[in-house]
Image (cartoon, rainbow, N blue to C red):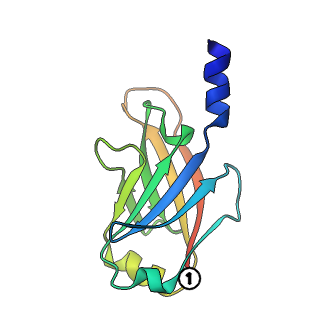
């Protein structure tokens, strides 16, 4: 029984799905530890951006001990908490982010995992997801 659960967890992959204005644009498999991951988005897909949604699914977000926050850019220009009742789901509705994204610069994305209960004595984790870039 335990070996089946362990095998199932090994086979599960973390995926990152990107939506623009609720339309699925891309889906990528996330590899922990990668430092050069890039998520290219075509300019045609980003016309009239109102919102960008990022969905991170898999073992990385399935741990109920942690609550996730999406950090955008090296200097942390924006932090977005995950949507209530949807672990790993982030809605990005921000003019500063849109301007940076549409400029064609790499936008680094980090997943910050903090204890869901501040009274718990477990360490926080900051995971590099990849660079979002307009092509």
**Residue at the extreme top of the image, as rendered:** 1
- Residue at 31% x, 50% y: name it: 83
The number of numbered badges drawn on the structure is: 1
Q: Quadrant of residue 9?
A: top right
- For the N terminus, the image quarter is top right
- Measuring from the top left, give residue 115's x and y in whole percent: 43, 35
> Which sits in the foreground, 31 or 122?
31
> Which sits in the foreground, 135 or 69?
135
Element type at marker 1? loop
Q: Residues within 10 Å of mark 1 (few under 14, many from 20)?
A: some
- Measuring from the top left, give residue 18's x and y in whole percent: 46, 64
Above or below, comparing residue 9 to residue 114 in the picture: above
- Residue at 58% x, 77% y: name it: 106
- Residue at 67% x, 48% y: name it: 32
> Which sits in the foreground, 14 or 110?
14
- Measuring from the top left, give residue 104's x and y in whole percent: 54, 85
Above or below, comparing residue 80 to residue 132 in the picture: above
User: Which residue in the protein does label 1 denote?
Assistant: 105
Above or below, comparing residue 69 to residue 19 in the picture: above
């Amino acid at each position: 029984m335990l070996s089946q659960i362990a095998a199932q967890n090994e086979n599960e992959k973390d995926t990152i799905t990107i939506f623009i204005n609720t339309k699925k644009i891309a889906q990528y498999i996330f590899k922990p530890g990668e430092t050069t991951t890039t998520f290219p988005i075509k300019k045609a897909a980003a016309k009239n951006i109102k919102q960008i949604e990022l969905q991170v699914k898999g073992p990385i977000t399935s741990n109920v001990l942690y609550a996730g926050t999406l950090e955008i850019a090296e200097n942390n220009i924006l932090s977005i908490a995950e949507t209530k009742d949807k672990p790993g789901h982030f809605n990005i509705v921000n003019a500063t982010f849109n301007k940076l994204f549409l400029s064609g610069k790499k936008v680094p994305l980090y997943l910050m995992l903090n204890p869901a209960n501040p009274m718990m004595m477990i360490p926080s984790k900051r995971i590099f997801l990849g660079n979002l870039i307009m092509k």
